Amino acid sequence: MSKFGTLVMGPAGAGKSTFCASLIQHLQTNKRPCFYVNLDPAAEDFAFEPDLDIKDLISLEDVMEEMSLGPNGGLIYCFEFLMENLDFLTDPLEEVTDEYLIVFDMPGQIELYTHVPILPGLVRTLMRGSLNINMCAAYLLEATFIIDRPKFFSGTLSAMSAMMMLEMPHVNILSKMDLIKGQVAKRDLKRFVDPDPNLLEDDPARKTQPENEERKGYQDPGLTKEVMSGSSFDRLNRAVAQLIDDFSMVSFLKLDVQDEDSIGLVLSYIDDAIQYHEAQEPKEPKDEYLEASMEAYD
Ligand SMILES: Nc1nc2c(ncn2[C@@H]2O[C@H](COP(=O)(O)OP(=O)(O)OP(=O)(O)O)[C@@H](O)[C@H]2O)c(=O)[nH]1
Ligand SMILES: [Mg+2]
């Protein structure tokens, strides 16, 4: 028997926990069971109480205090501790059946998804061995990144880096679409959904830069705004965009958490990636009739 799950990840504040809450609400509305796992040792407020919470094993606050570590070092310590105490995670998950969608809410520290080799080990444990969870990553990038095109490509590169490191099916999502409503034309939006490297050539922000921007940038490297401009910066950005285009691995789904249809669409991509529906027993018409009449009495 397979199990099914999605690892909700992405940079800090991308809207991961909000998406988890909307997804759980949507699953409940559609009478689908869900098992919510919080893997953020710093998370505090939840719209839905987690079924399993890493904070019951270790909390970032305690680690920072007792080990004199900062938030990033502390987080890495928490995950190393989790890897040494995997029963905490695997034992409860053994009990979860194939009707459930297991939703893992991840922390936002980007190093976890790029160069620290902890997550690949965790993903292997979840996907292989006795747990055998069909997993897919849901990688969120905030839609406001679109407004700053180099930042958008840098965010897309981080999504691609996570895809390569984790070697699992990926659904990339532009979150908080409500924040850019009316600011980007539909035709332009399409070029972000399937990232088009020419977006950098056509960047209106680039065209408004003064001609001597590069010289200014080198003269005063302490000012980020000026360093992050000029022809060297342009060349670097173009190389990054070209790299993304060459691999053509990343495309995005648009997410508006206030819109039930939008959540439903993202869920349908996750379901496809993990082949959720293929594993479900077809219900006998008799069962469906029975369920409907029981609901009528509720
Ligand atoms: N406008 C808008 N705000 C959102 C949306 N999703 C999340 N937010 C806000 O963005 C902030 C961060 O949201 P979270 O869901 O906590 O983001 P996160 O990725 O879980 O954050 P970390 O776990 O700290 O990395 C909160 O203030 C949310 O209210 C959205 O779709 N639209
Ligand atoms: Mg969160």
Image (cartoon, grey):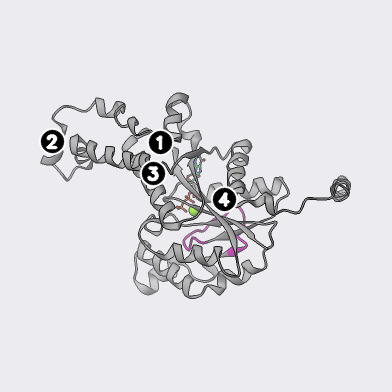
Tell me which numbered mark, 3 or 2, is placed earlier along the sequence: 2
Q: Is the C-beta separation of discs 3 and 2 under 8 Å?
A: no
Q: Looking at the image, which residue is at 59% across and 49% down?
A: 21
Residue 82 on image: x %, y %: 48, 70
Measured Cα–Cα span from mark 3 to mark 2:
34 Å
> Mark 1: few, some, or many residues within 10 Å (few <14, many ≥20)?
many
* Badge nearest the viewer, 1 or 4: 1
Looking at the image, is 38 positioned above or below residue 213?
Answer: below
Measured Cα–Cα span from mark 3 to mark 4:
29 Å
> Mark 3: few, some, or many residues within 10 Å (few <14, many ≥20)?
few
Measured Cα–Cα span from mark 2 to mark 4:
44 Å
* Badge nearest the viewer, 3 or 4: 3
Measured Cα–Cα span from mark 1 to mark 3:
11 Å
Q: Amino acid at mark 2?
A: Lys
Q: Amino acid at mark 3?
A: Phe
Tell me which numbered mark, 2 or 4, is placed earlier along the sequence: 4
Q: Looking at the image, which residue is at 47% across and 71% down?
A: 83
The residue carrying mark 2 is 216
The residue carrying mark 3 is 247
**Which region shows up in magenta?**
39-52
> The residue tagged with tag 2: helix, strand or loop?
helix
Q: Is residue 92 left or right of residue 139?
A: right
Q: Is the C-beta separation of discs 3 and 4 under 8 Å?
A: no
Measured Cα–Cα span from mark 1 to mark 4:
25 Å
Question: From where the camera sits, is residue 185 visible?
Answer: no
Residue 247 on image: x %, y %: 38, 44
Q: Quadrant of the N terminus?
A: bottom right
The residue carrying mark 4 is 20
Q: Is residue 292 left or right of residue 133?
A: right
> Mark 2: few, some, or many residues within 10 Å (few <14, many ≥20)?
some
Q: Is the C-beta separation of discs 2 and 4 under 8 Å?
A: no
